[in-house]
Image: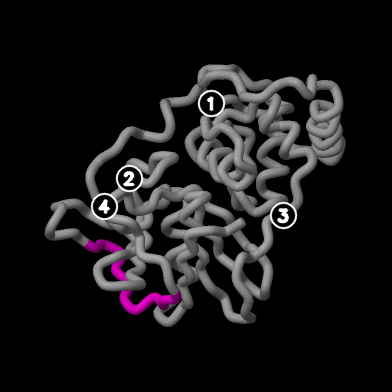
Amino acid sequence: MLAAVHYHRPAVEVRAPAPTPARVGAAAVALATLALVLPPSATADPLPGVSLRPRTVDAVQRKLAELGFLPRSGVDGIFGAQSRGAVIAFQKWEGLVRDGIPGPVTQRALAAAKRPTPRTRGRRTRVEILLDRQVVLLVRRRRVARVMHASTGKRGFATPTGQYAVFRKRRRAFSIPYEVRLPYASYFVRGIAIHQARSVPVRPASHGCVRVTRYDAKWLYRRTPVGTPVRVLADSR
């Protein structure tokens, strides 16, 4: 895969105090309050570089984890690259500006959001790749376990739609045509795989593969053995 513009910039990390029952309750109230007091006329979040209060970071992370956009281990009080990727995935799902910043519009949407639902039917654990939203879903027991920020094939190299299954897995794969390493690769059709990438833009940018961040690649790799169904959808609405 060719290198592309990074979806994130180095972020100033903000540490929140250690969570306690009182702080958890206060964080939930803070997020709900933001949804009530912010003006409905706002249509886009601020530009990157906006500082976040520790209480806001904690509330945003907990809500993202509750909805399946962030693993529980990611609720650490630090708004870094992992949290920004989760915010981007949420913004993609909701059709918001994909800037990775939990500004007023994103916070208001988080406060009202419900957990995403599968786009296909079936009892088996499966992967759903939604090309229109540029996200990857892991569905387990008919429930969306995770929603992950992804970048699929760009124009001329579109990731093919259809029903497939993981047929080969390599922790350290290598693309000969493009001379690039593909960590945690799960191949599901020809030479196309879901894999870790250093760059995961908010738009389609690969040569057909499905790029995910280093925070999601290993997690997904471990939960999708050979034979796992993969559904690639052009329209997920």
Ranked by sequence position, the earlier of labels 1 and 2 is 1
Label 2 belongs to which residue? 205
Label 1 belongs to which residue? 13
Mark 1: secondary structure: loop
Question: Who is closer to the viewer here, 68 or 91?
Answer: 91
On screen, residue 33 versus residue 167, left or right, reads: right
Question: Who is closer to the viewer here, 204 or 50?
Answer: 204
At 49% from the left and 63% from the top, the residue drawn is 233
Is residue 33 one of those drawn in magenta? no
Q: Is residue 151 above or below residue 185?
A: above
Label 3 belongs to which residue? 115
Q: Is residue 95 above or below residue 128?
A: above
Residues under numbered marks 4 and 1 in contact, where contact means CB atoms less than 8 Å apart: no
Mark 3: secondary structure: loop
Question: Nearer the observer, disc 3 or disc 1?
Answer: 3
The location of residue 167, given as percent across then percent down, is 34, 79
Question: Magenta segment range?
Answer: 163-173
Q: CA distance from mark 1 to mark 2?
A: 28 Å
Q: CA distance from mark 3 to mark 4?
A: 33 Å
Label 4 belongs to which residue? 156
